[in-house]
Image (cartoon, rainbow, N blue to C red):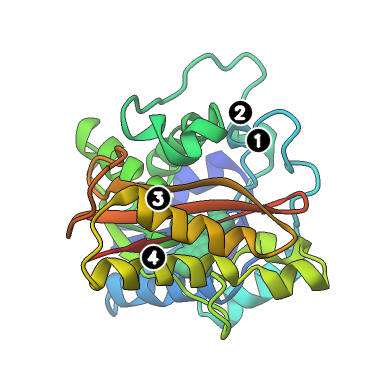
Amino acid sequence: MQLIETAEAVRTFARERKTRRVLVPTMGALHHGHLELIRLARAAAEDEGEVVVSIFVNPLQFEPGADYERYPRPEEDDAELCRQASVDVLFRPLPHEMYRGDRSVTVEEHSLSETLCGKSRPGHFRGVCTVVAKLFHLLAPHAAVFGEKDFQQLAIIRRMVRDLDFDVEIIAAPTVREPDGLAASSRNRYLNEAEREQAPVIRAALLEAAQLAREGETCGERLLALARARITSAPSAQIDYVELVDAETLQSQAIAGPDSLLAAAVFFGQTRLIDNLRLA
Ligand code: AMP
């Protein structure tokens, strides 16, 4: 595996290599969810292609006061996991390689970013779009893999690719879970024992609401009331949002249908966890 740490070196690498390249952008602290993305990237790269993983804790997508400083950075473990997963190139730039002090251009999406996490984390998706656009320019991948756990992020990246004509195929990876249903996340390692025990309630609540919908309930408020009540039954849970939205537009829905998505963000202590479920 080749480790590249500068923007210049990665650009040279991308220019020189003529083979198919599939990118998996991450912030590191890799877990089995990321490994599934790498597996899909390997399949998409085909025999001759290369899998590139980027690890960059992107300061632009953390709001002031969020967990940028304390975000886990287990560099050696991450590099070893990438080696074991037969990653061809690990791109791990330092912040000054990605952002100049006087930078003044960002990429912003103005519709899908207005709801859900965009409401609670102002500027977050501007940071995400900007860094992903930069990674696409630097690495010129043929395809890139993103997880459905971050459903809104995936939708926004697809929109950015469409609206700005990036020549990159976006591949979606289904959410990978722990045996108790909790979505795998780098942030799960922040949870104390009690919080970790209670965190699967998010998934359980979304499944219960989906079951009610399957039984014929279409009233969004009733579905959400059930999910919210289930989540708040966990003593450490503080709801940021639980919403029913259209899976295409991410706009709030009053009536559930086959295009609906249930999405939740819940704090356990300082740790904010997200999950979602398609009703179809
Ligand atoms: P992160 O390192 O958290 O920024 O995530 C990097 C990529 O991995 C994003 O595309 C995430 O959606 C994806 N990802 C993170 N956790 C999971 C998971 N549990 N299942 C599927 N994809 C995931």
* Secondary element at image label 2: loop
Q: Position of residue 182 (x, y in %)?
A: 57, 73
Q: Name which residue lies at 54% across and 39% down.
A: 8
Q: Nearer the viewer, mark 1 or mark 4?
A: 4
Tell me: residue 165, above or below residue 67. Answer: above
In-image side of 209 versus 273 (left or right): left
Q: Tag 4 or tag 2, which sits nearer the N-term?
A: 2
- Residue receiving disc 3: 14
In-image side of 197 versus 247 (left or right): right
Q: Where is residue 68 in the image (x, y as percent from the top left)?
A: 73, 41
Name the residue type under label 3: Ala
Disc assigned to residue 99: 2
Determine the image quadrant of residue 223: bottom left
* Front-most of residues 100 and 199: 199
Q: Quadrant of the C terminus?
A: bottom left
Tell me: residue 250, above or below residue 81. Answer: above
Name the residue type under label 2: Tyr
Tell me: residue 106, above or below residue 4. Answer: above
User: Can you see residue 67?
Assistant: yes
Disc assigned to residue 209: 4
Q: Nearer the viewer, mark 4 or mark 3?
A: 4
Q: How far apart are marks 2 and 3 (CA)?
A: 19 Å
Tell me: residue 31, above or below residue 154. Answer: below
Q: Position of residue 6 (x, y in %)?
A: 61, 44
- Residue receiving disc 1: 59
Q: Name which residue lies at 19% across and 55% down.
A: 259
